[in-house]
């Protein structure tokens, strides 16, 4: 869920509907999405976290947070996935030094930045996953 108040209300309504359908509480888990790195998750998402504390009918761990990262938009522009960029073994710094024209240099610079942002995003996703399931 994202931090806008309407989406928080929608999330609470969805959780309520899931519980009415008989979904066990240990299977309803909230991920806090698009939070800024310096956001206090417990403040920004207080309505859902407070509801979780009162209701005890679902899991809302404030450490299950995905931070805003421009890598996702940048990946769309080059048509590759986060998995593709983090698994790419290419040394774009070396390729940059060997580049012959400006287009190739520009591509290498973009890929170096994408790989760096990708590593950060991947660490964040791993941390959120661990917070959800551990």
Image (tube, helix red, strand yellow):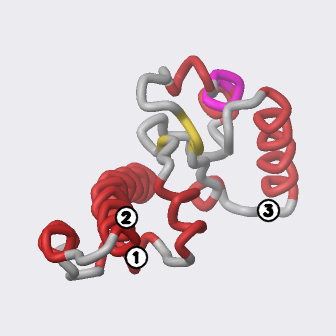
| Image mark for residue 22 | 3
Q: What span is in magenta?
A: 46-50
**Residue 83 percent across, percent down from the top left:** 40, 76
Please name the residue shown 39% across and 54% down the image: 121
- In this rendered view, identify the residue nearer to me: 89 or 129: 89
Q: Is 8 on the left or on the right of 110, as rendered?
A: right
Q: Secondary structure at mark 3?
A: loop
- Quadrant of res 28: bottom right
In depth, the one of 43 and 51 nearer the eye is: 43
Circle nearer the N terminus (3, 2): 3
Q: Would you name the residue on which mark 1 appears?
A: 83
Could you say which disc has been placed on residue 114 in the image? none
Q: Secondary structure at mark 2?
A: helix
Q: CA distance from mark 3 to mark 2?
A: 54 Å
Residue 47 in magenta? yes
Residue 123 visible in image: no
Contact, mark 3 vs mark 2 (Cβ under 8 Å): no
The residue under the point 59% across, 44% down is 33
- On the image, the x and y values in percent for residue 44 come to 61, 22
**Label 1 crowd bin: few (<14), some (14–19), many (20+), radius 10 Å:** few
The residue indicated by pointer 2 is 106
The quadrant of the rendering that contains the C terminus is bottom left
Q: Principal SS element in the magenta part?
A: helix
Residue occupying image coordinates x 57% and y 17%: 43
Secondary structure under the numbered disc 1 in the rendered image: helix
């Amino acid at each position: 869920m994202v931090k806008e108040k309407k989406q928080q209300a929608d999330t609470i309504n969805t959780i309520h509907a899931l519980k009415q359908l008989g979904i066990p509480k240990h299977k309803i888990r909230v991920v806090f999405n698009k939070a800024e790195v310096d956001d206090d998750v417990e403040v920004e998402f207080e309505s859902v976290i407070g509801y979780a504390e009162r209701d005890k009918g679902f899991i809302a761990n404030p450490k299950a947070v995905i931070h805003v990262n421009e890598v996702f938009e940048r990946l769309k522009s080059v048509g590759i996935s986060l998995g593709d960029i983090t698994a790419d073994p290419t040394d774009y710094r070396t390729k940059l030094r060997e580049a012959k024209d400006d287009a190739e240099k520009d591509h290498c610079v973009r890929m170096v930045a994408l790989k760096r942002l990708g590593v950060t995003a991947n660490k964040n996703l791993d941390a959120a996953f661990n917070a959800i399931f551990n």
